[in-house]
Image (tube, rainbow, N blue to C red):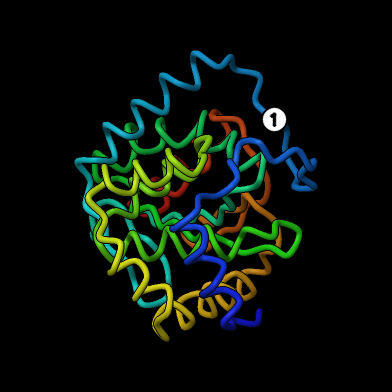
Amino acid sequence: MRISQALIASATLLILTGCAPAASQTAPATDTGSSSSENSSSASSEKTIAIATGASLKEELLESGILEIGEENAPVSMLLFTNYSCGYCLDFHDHLYSKLLTEYVSVGKVRLGIVPLAMQKYPQSLTTAALMLCSAKQKKGKLMHDLLFTELDEKKLQKEISALGLTMDALQQCIASDDLKVMLSSEEKYALSFGISLAPSYVINNRKFTGLPEWADLRGQIEEALRTAR
């Protein structure tokens, strides 16, 4: 992945002028898994639960570009590789993320790491990843993660950035920093180390899974990891 001035210009332009909605991307995802059929009202309710639950959880941005959420001593570690333009990633966020936070992360069973995976087929990947990581530098990573999965226009983006309490100067300085370039490069290397090239993908205690799971399957995978960890 080449990190250049083009990224800095693109991300800065996104902050200043808005971005296209992740949810409006119509290109079909090639990821494995099947799309959820839950209705929009259920999705809206689950998003609300996720935001409310996530707000009370600890977050830490690692130098590797991983946003870690939850208790450091949780017996199970889960890494979620996601993309804000990916349809199946949107489904994961809408239908599984809140359950994951509520049933496992908030009670100290799972420490969740979020990795915004840049992918060539989604031109905005680097831009949205930069926004999430630079928001995480201001301890607003969880909230930006939720925001990037909603429909955004120029006015709404700028309003939401302000509502989140993000400092525009700090965002722009972060986007132009060498630290951001290092984090984005580290994320790519981390994904390659697990052989991950598709989103969503996730790793539970070093066991890799690719595609959008059913909740019952994801819960079973976590429960198995919990049994092994005991």
Residue shown at 62% from the left, 49% from the top:
200
- Identify residue for label 1: 35
Q: Position of residue 159 (x, y in %)?
A: 34, 41
Q: In the figure, 215 relative to 163: above or below?
A: above
Name which residue lies at 61% across and 30% down: 214
Q: Residues within 10 Å of mark 1 (few under 14, many from 20)?
A: some
Which quadrant of the figure contains the N terminus?
bottom right
Q: Position of residue 27 (x, y in %)?
A: 79, 43
| Point 34% across, 76% down: residue | 173
Of 92 and 106, the residue lying toward us: 92
Instruction: Pick whichever, 121 or 169, lies toward us.
Output: 169
With respect to residue 178, does 195 lie above or below? above
Judging from the image, what secondary structure is the residue with disc 1 in? loop
In the picture, measured across the screen, residue 156 lies left or right of residue 122, that is left
Q: Amino acid at mark 1?
A: Ser
Which quadrant would residue 10 be assigned to in this image? bottom right
Q: Residue furthest bottom?
A: 178
Depth check, front residue: 9 or 227 = 9
Horizontal side, residue 124 vs residue 146: left or right: right
Residue at left 63%, top 47%?
Answer: 85
Residue 172 lies, with reference to residue 165, above or below; the image says below
Number of numbered labels in the structure image: 1
Between 102 and 88, the one lying in front of the other is 88
Residue 13 located left or right of residue 54: right
